Image (spheres, rainbow, N blue to C red):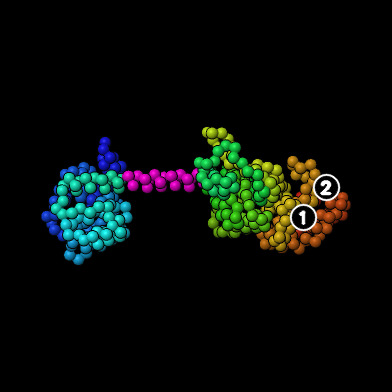
Amino acid sequence: MDEIAHITSNLDATPTILCVDDEKIILTSLQEQLRNNLQGVAIEIAESGEEGLEVLQELIDDNVPVPIVISDQLMPGMRGEEFLEKTHAMLPDAHNVLLTGQATADSVGEAVNRANLYRYIGKPWSEDDLILTAKEALIAWGRARDLRTKDQELRASHAASLRFVPREFLSVLGKQRVVDVEEGHAVEIEMQVVFADMRSFSTHAANLGPKQAFDLLNEYINILDTVFREAGGFIGGLEGDGVLALFSGTVDDAVQAGISAQQALLERGRSTDNRPGIDMGLAVHTGELILGTVGNSERLKCDVIGDPVNFCARLESMTRDFDTPMLISDEVASTLTSKLSLRRIPGIMVKGRETPATVYEVLDALPASQKQARVFTSVEFNAAMDALEHGEHEMARDMLVEICSTDTSDRTAQFLLQRIG
């Protein structure tokens, strides 16, 4: 199969050459010579520039490829260079050919500069010259089309790959392209870590069925991704309904993003549709971690490892114990500059740590009514935590009992009271 046959066979519609000339005999001659020498190509004709534009628009509307437009230069009304300029604006990929025996250097120059003229052929023309020009123009058009298609495929493939390897991850690794990433690439960097987990997803999945469960999961991830990106972060890992996000900015950025994510889910829950509600536990920590690639030459995965990641995941799991939506570490709380409503909880044993840790409950992530209730008892709660930290368990118990009677929705106080026994 020659190249022209290859080009025409790979198109959804028959490629069409448009010929425009005010002399009928010229059009008939062009049509016959092109039709007899170009297989798989249709020929359309028009007797003026105005008619030519109408025919071209119809072809475009019908999704017919037009690789070549041949136009006379001297025509009543619209001249050839003006017609080809308009043609180029409508169909910039077409190869334009000016056909005339009376064209001036200025008119040819205008066509070259403003209509992307492919070639000028003088009248009377040689049939061999006409056919050679048409074949070369068709081949050049086909090659350019193939290059554009391949470029679009490459861009689409690159865009798809960035859904698996975030652009921000590449930036941290100092890479511009996914193909530059190899096994073993790693950097150590201080970042803010956010770990979030949807609660009761297994129950939702069992009740909803596979498709609806995946729709719910994707909706949840999209909400987090939007909020985190707006705050300068990005999702660095997904594990089922668990989401790991990273922030290279300040701890305030990460904490505010966590609060915004919780509020976005609360807002979603206030909608009137029948979608299942989404509850989430979320934690924020900070520290030195390692970003890099793990795997082999056949399969690579970008991953984040380090104590800050492990601690943040364990801190998030404790949101279930306290039945609170958001906790942050002492390291994060001590660096915060934002004025937030926090409750300090000392003496917490976290898996992987030999000494008790202090964590903070973020009241701003609660519904407004619950936040108000927690703020109302904050003085008593802080006093109870001070007593607990100093080993005064009886005093702490009495204060927590009082808090729980004042605010029956305070699950954190109830959990701490049960721990004291």
Residue 107 x/y as whole percent: 24, 61
- Give 164 or 213, whichever is nearer the viewer: 164
Quadrant in the picture for the N terminus: top left
Residue 155 inside the magenta-drawn segment: yes
Disc 2/disc 1 C-alpha distance (Å): 20 Å
- Foreground residue among 197 and 27: 27
Residue 185 in sight from this viewpoint:
yes
Within the magenta stretch, is there residue 81? Answer: no
Would you name the residue on which mark 1 appears?
Answer: 344
Q: Main secondary structure of the magenta part?
A: helix
72 with respect to 360 (left or right): left
Q: Give the numbered dot on residue 421.
A: 2
Give the extent of the magenta segment: 143-163
Left or right: residue 147 versus residue 403 is left
Q: Crowdedness of circle 1 by 10 Å Cα count: few (<14), some, many (20+)?
A: some
Amino acid under disc 1? Arg
Could you tell me residue 220's position as x and y percent? 57, 51
Q: Is residue 391 above or below residue 185?
A: below
Identify the residue shown where x is 64% and y is 57%: 253
| Residue 94 percent location from the top left of the image | 29, 52
How many neighbours does mark 2 have within 10 angstroms: few (below 14), some (14-19), or many (20 or more)? few
Comes first in the chain, label 2 or label 1: 1
Relative side of 255 to 349, left or right = left
Q: Residue at x 70, y 43 (%)?
A: 307
Element type at mark 1 = strand
